[in-house]
Amino acid sequence: MARLTKRLTAVKVQGLKAKGLHADGDGLYLKITATGSKSWIYRFTIAGRTRDMGLGKYPEIGLSGARIAVQSLKEKGGDPIEAKALKRLAAQNATAESARVALTFSEACERYLANKLAGYRNAKHRQQWTNTLTAYAVPIIGGKAALTLSRRDILAVLMQPHRKAKQPVEAPLWLGLPETASRLRGRVEKVIDFAAAHEGVEDHLNPARLDGALKMLLPDRPVAPEQHFPAISIADAPAFMRNLQPKESLSARALKFLIYTVTRSGDVRGARWSEVDAGRTLWTIPAERMKVKSKTQPHRVPLSAPAHDLLTSQPRIAGCDLIFPSMQGKPLSDMALSELMRGSKFTAAPPYQDRKPTPHGWRSTFKDWARENTRAPADVVELCLAHKNPDDVERAYGRSDLLELRRELMDAWAAFCDAGGNIVTLRKFA
């Protein structure tokens, strides 16, 4: 006959000090460690395997409480350790689900902007990101859970009534400000993708994605006429330079340098002395300052004699690396160069003859001049403008930047700008 286990009592549990396991029956044990701490153990056998499950410390859990816990586990059956693990996992999933739903679009915007905007180098671009989201998206969907937004919500954002300045009639944002609306849609899409990644939700169907369904729901836009930067005509270029040459303001000198180098306004306004070689014959624009973000190589600009002379006479400000710094030691504003063009007596070449030419338009003037008045190969002209070759194969194999050929062309361009308009004599480029 099996010997019955002598049950513990509350007094005995309190007085026990011997290290080890002290049985109470039904698989309940009082465990005493070498340090004297006491806890309850439930020992059970399942599938031929003996396992121990902790029930809690003594005296937080007394003898009666431990017995009740064991009785409850026996009634439930199965493996209580596995059941506890599954319960913990379910609680974690419930917590994650609750946190996911609680992340509103407005909160997702704040986190996305905090994490991602630092990667955008252009301060204006960063500001535009923030402005479009806070002005058009947050007021409509900001309080909704980011990952519960539907296409209907996205349509409410893109089709919200908008009134342009000085126009009494409202129009949907998608039609009234198409470029802004398109950028807004893309930015909303990125914020929702960020929310899904942040909450660990895979394969989330983003309602802002411009797939077939959203395209079908959005109205078609009328095709807008193609717009280009108004440019000065080839015939007017030398006369414009004659009027500009006597002007010695910083913005005038920067504009002259832009014309001689046919680079972008931002490249010139951000130009640094450290980018120009000692002989003032080569200006190397780092890849990170170029408009084409996919460029991994710097853009080398051969400097013609007039460009060289302009840099040689340009005063250098102590402690400032910028070639054309403002009074505050920062790059000039784009408006500083644009105002010089607007203030001139010249109008743009057709079809924009009713408008003033722009600094960027000089790139178009140069390209037309090179095509009409030189034998320069097209790829040489495009490299002068730092344009990316759209043909992947040609770009992969044509790795030379044709510097010396470009130098000859840039010398001819500078001579034309300063020559007084005789463009016939410039057909000698080989």
Image (cartoon, grey):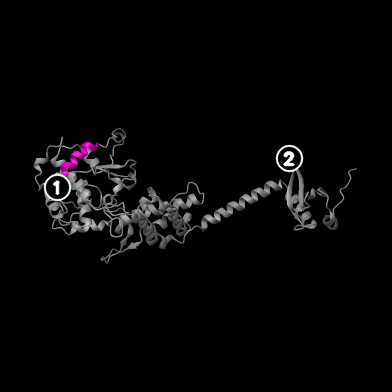
SS state under label 1: helix
Asked whether residue 136 is in view, the answer is: yes
Residue extent of the magenta highlight: 402-413
User: Is 409 within the magenta?
Assistant: yes
In this orientation, which residue lies closer to the viewer: 428 or 7?
428
Asked whether residue 207 is in view, the answer is: no
Please name the predominant secondary structure of the magenta segment in the image: helix
In this orientation, which residue lies closer to the viewer: 206 or 34?
34
Residue at x 25%, y 51% (from the top left corner): 265
Q: Quadrant of the C terminus?
A: top left
Residue at x 85%, y 58% (from the top left corner): 11
Q: For residue 331, what is the image quadrant?
A: bottom left
Q: Residues within 10 Å of mark 2 (few under 14, many from 20)?
A: few
Q: Which mark is residue 417?
A: 1
User: Is 352 within the magenta?
Assistant: no
CA distance separating discs 2 and 1:
94 Å
User: How far across and down, in percent of the image, does residue 78 sit?
Assistant: 71, 46
Q: Residues within 10 Å of mark 1 (few under 14, many from 20)?
A: many
Q: In this image, 114 relative to 182: left or right?
A: right
In this orientation, which residue lies closer to the viewer: 57 or 94?
57
Residue ID for mark 2 = 47
Q: In this image, 154 relative to 248: left or right?
A: right
Q: Residue furthest top?
A: 397
Q: Callout 1, which amino acid?
A: Cys
Q: Which mark is residue 120?
A: none
Q: Callout 2, which amino acid?
A: Ala
Residue at x 14%, y 47% (from the top left corner): 417
SS state under label 2: loop
Query: If you read the primary sequence from the N terminus, does the residue marked by circle 2 or circle 1 appear first?
Result: 2
